[in-house]
Image (cartoon, coloured by chain):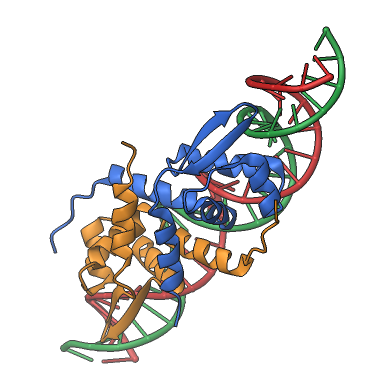
Chain colours: A orange, B blue, C green, D red
DNA sequence: ATATTATATGCAAATAAATATATAAATATT
DNA sequence: AATATTTATATATTTATTTGCATATAATAT
């Protein structure tokens, strides 16, 4: 019954990134940006049919947690996935569905 | 700028399962149960050095969201991963760390 | 039946996250 | 400089999650 030495910092980091992804609209954003798409905030909030502020808020969370990157081009700010593997994660979660 | 028809139910289901995993202690539990281990509640709360009720609570969440299964053997209830792919997800999250 | 061991449940307090609405800031255009 | 466009931030409200502690249930053993 050895007690485990847990690396709480690492666990918290993983949990934190997962929490960033664990939201319906944020998953939708990730799917939009999948396949290397770059989209600006206006495109995203119109496609998802949500408020501009709401989209901006979600994008900010995803960016802060290192899921997305952004790049300004004039007035517009384009968001894109930092890593390609995220969609796989979502797919995997969906695949492991209750049989 | 076509608006997307989103399958909210599916998005919510994926988010819900991700939320179940997105907790430090629950990730620790998943890692304990990785490689096909079956452990009972007592073993888990002692290894993780948390309260019995806390372990039971987390296990319940993981079971409800379809991450874990359980099997009673006498007094003891053994928990185990429903799907092997979960550890991969956690690893992936960790791998995509901020460079 | 009582006690013991193993697990689950209930509840209240604290904390965190989501949502809506309003407003501000940055850039570009005239 | 005034205006329009695009994005971000602030704040209040609601809702969800976490935590700790106490208690309940379930199975077994005496």
For the question of whether residue A64 can be seen, the reply is yes
Drawn side of residue B65 relative to residue C30, left or right: right
> Which of the 4 image quadrants contains residue A87?
bottom left
The mark tally for this picture is 0
> Outermost residue toward the left?
B2
Residue A52 versus residue B9: which sits nearer the camera? B9
Q: Nearer the viewer, residue C21 or B62?
A: B62
Does any portion of residue A51 appear in the rendered image? no
In the image, is residue A95 above or below residue A48? above
Relative height, residue A59 to residue A78 (above, below): above
Comparing C28 with C23, the one in front is C28
Q: Name which residue lies at 70% across and 42% down.
A: B52
**In this picture, residue C2 sits left or right of residue A65:** right
Left or right: D6 in relation to D23: left
Position in image of residue A73 (x %, y %): 25, 86
- Location of the C terminus of chain A (image quadrant): top left
Tell me where residue B65 appears, x and y as whole percent: 44, 41
Percent from the top left, x then y, of residue A95? 29, 48
Q: Quadrant of residue B43?
A: top right
The residue drawn where x is 57% and y is 58% is B24
Tell me which residue sits at (25%, 57%) in the image.
A48
The residue depicted at 67 percent of the width and 64 percent of the height is: A5
In the rendered image, residue B14, in percent from the top left (x then y), is placed at 35, 49
Left or right for B2, reference D13: left
């Amino acid at each position: 019954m050895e007690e485990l030495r847990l690396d709480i910092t690492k666990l918290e980091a993983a949990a934190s990134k997962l929490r960033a992804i664990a939201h319906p609209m944020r998953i939708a954003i990730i799917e939009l940006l999948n396949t290397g798409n770059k989209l600006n905030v206006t495109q995203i909030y119109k496609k998802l049919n949500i408020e501009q502020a709401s989209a901006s808020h979600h994008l900010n969370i995803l960016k802060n947690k290192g899921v997305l990157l952004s790049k300004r081009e004039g007035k517009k700010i384009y968001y894109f996935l930092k890593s390609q593997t995220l969609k796989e994660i979502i797919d995997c979660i969906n695949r492991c569905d209750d049989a």
